[in-house]
Image (cartoon, helix red, strand yellow):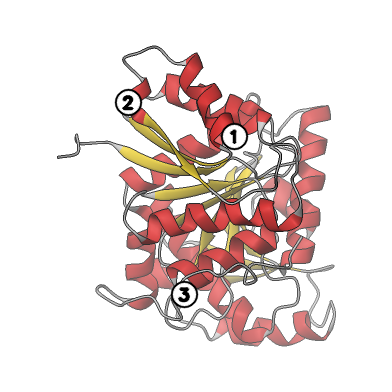
Amino acid sequence: MREPGTARIAVDLLGGDQAPAVVVDGALRACQADPALQLLLVGPVEAADAVLAALGPADRGRVCAVAAPTGPHAQDRDVSSVESGVRSAVLAVAQGLADAVVSAGNTGATVTSAALGLGRWPGVRRPALTAVLPTAAGRIVLLDVGSSVDPDETTLAMHARLGAAYASVVHGVAAPRVGLLTIGTERGKGDRLRRAVPAVLAALDLPAGGSYAGLVEGNDVVTGAPADVVVADGFTGNVLLKGLETAYALLGAPNPGEVPPRAAVLLGVGGTVVVCHGAASGADIAAGIGFAAALHRRAAVPAIADLIIGPEAPATDRKTPDPQSARGGS
C-alpha cells in the first residue's frame, strides 16, 4: 500500500539537450529534496544506475530503472532512441506504474506520445502547453507555449477554457480574466485569426466564472494588469516565453527572486505531463519533477478536467504509442 503523499514520477532520461547527464543530476536533486518521491527513470539503465549509486541505501528503494529501446551505445541519441524514452514514460502512466511524466525532450514527440498514449479530453483537438510567468502584478498563465503552432478559432477557444480552469484550480484565481495576445489593443488589430477570435471568446462560457478581458500586447504580459490568462498560438507563445526567460535571467524578474520556471504542464490529455525546456539545467529538471509531483498531490489535472468536461468523462483517442507515432514538433 502506498504511503499518503507519495508521488511516482516517470522521468525521460533521454530528453533534453544535455541528456542523460543533466536529467540524472535533476533526478538526484529531486529525490534528495522530497522523501515522499518515487522515480521511474526511463532510458539507458546505466544512466539510472548513476542516480542509484549517488543515493544512500535507505533511498535507493524509491528509484527504479525502466529500460527504453536505445541505440547501440549510451551516447547514440538518434531521433528514434530519444523518442522511445518519452513513449515509454507515457506508457508507464497509462499502465498505472507512474502518476506523472516529466520530459525535456522534443516537444512534438512528447505531445503526440501523451495524446496517443493517455488520450485527449472530449472536445480537445489539440492539447495546450501551459506555463506561468511572474509579472509585476503577480502571476499570469500563458498558453499555448509550443504545442499547437497553427491553431484555428476552435482550438484557441478551448485553450481559453483550459487556461481559465488552470488559473482557478492551481492558483486559486476567482473569476479569471482571459485575454488574447496580439499586436495592439485596438479593434481589428492582428492577422485574420486574431481578428476573428475575439467575438468567439466574448461569447464563450468560461469555467470558474471566467470572462474575456479583451486584447493584450506583449508588454501587458509583463505588467500582468489586464488579464490572469493570456491565450496565444504555440509559435508566438513559445517565442514570448523564451524571450522573457532570457530577459528575466539577465535583468531580473518583476518580482525579485521569482523567475519563470522552465517547465510547462500539458493540458487536455488524460494524465499529468510536464515538459521542461530542452536547455534545462539539473535544477530546472528537479523543479519540473517537483512541479509534476505537486500537481499530482493536488489532483490538479483531474480537477481541471472536471471544469472542462465534467466529472467521470473518459479521455478519448487513446492508443498505445507505436515506434513511428511521435514524430514532429519543435
Q: Circle 3: is it few (<14), some (14-19), or many (20+) Cα within 10 Å?
A: many
Q: Residue at x 52, y 64 (%)?
A: 114
Residue at figure coordinates x 44%, y 64% from the top left: 165
Query: Label 1 to label 3, Cα distance in Å?
Result: 25 Å
Under tag 3, what secondary structure? loop
Where is mark 1, residue-wise? 285
Q: Residues within 10 Å of mark 1 (few under 14, many from 20)?
A: many
Q: Amino acid at mark 3?
A: Arg
Q: Earlier in the sequence, mark 2 or mark 3?
A: 2
At 61% across and 67% down in the image, what residue appears?
A: 323
Where is 287 relative to 144, above or below? Answer: above
**Whole-percent x and y of residue 135?**
65, 42
Decide if residue 114 is in sight here: yes
Instruction: Give the quadrant of residue 3.
Output: top left
Residue type highlighted by circle 1: Ile
Give x and y (percent) for residue 222. 72, 46
* Residue at screen point 37% across, 48% down: 98
Q: Which label was assigned to residue 120?
A: 3
Instruction: List the residue tagged with mark 2.
Output: 61
Q: Quadrant of the N terminus?
A: top left
Q: Residues within 10 Å of mark 2 (few under 14, many from 20)?
A: few
Q: Which amino acid type is marked by label 2? A: Gly
Instruction: State left or right for residue 191 relative to residue 28.
Output: right
Query: Mark number for residue 121?
Result: none
